[in-house]
Amino acid sequence: MSSRKGGQHKKRRKKEGKILAGMNPLPEYLLQTSSPPASLPPPVQSRLQDLPFDQLPWDYFERLCKTLVEADHEIRACRLYGRPGQKQRGIDLLAYPKDFVTVQPSAISFSLLQE
């Protein structure tokens, strides 16, 4: 089986050699080197790099802020707070740091509350 593959490899190399031999050499103008002009204009003009936050719908802006907060490696979790139309007292996102510990009320014993 390996001799068969070797034969196919030789045929392919021979065919590639014929293709390369039939190619024309590079034209002379491609081989010439020239010096660049003294001054070149910039290739592009960049546009203003500000995001149009004032043009974003509120829910898009809220999700953008959530995505940015979630990218912080110190944040364990982030979620949107409340529902549309619900009074939220200015709170849009809840973010929890990695070292934040939650305690369920049922885990607190009554004797701890009396002390």
Image: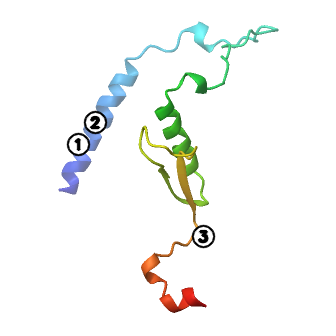
Q: Residue at x 67, y 17 (%)?
A: 46
Disc 2 is placed on an element classified as: helix
Local crowd at mark 3 within 10 Å, few (<14), some, or many (≥20)? few
Chosen colour scheme? rainbow
Side (left or right) of 65 relative to 41: left
Measured in 3D between alpha carbons, the distance from the residue under mark 3 to the one under mark 2, in whole angstroms, is 63 Å
x and y, in percent, of residue 78 in the image: 51, 54
Amino acid at dot 3: Asp
Quick one: 42 or 11, which is closer to the camera? 42
Position above or below: 56 against 107: above
First of labels 1, 3 by sequence position: 1
First of labels 3, 2 by sequence position: 2
CB atoms at circles 2 and 1 under 8 Å apart? yes
Disc 1 is placed on an element classified as: helix
Q: Which residue is mark 1?
A: 8
Q: Which quadrant of the structure image shows residue 27?
A: top right
Q: Which residue is mark 2?
A: 12
Q: Which residue is mark 3?
A: 99
Outermost front residue? 114
x and y, in percent, of residue 29 in the image: 60, 7
Position above or below: 91 against 42: below
Amino acid at dot 1: Gln
CB atoms at circles 3 and 2 under 8 Å apart? no
Q: Residue at x 49, y 84 (%)?
A: 108
Quick one: 104 or 8, which is closer to the camera? 104
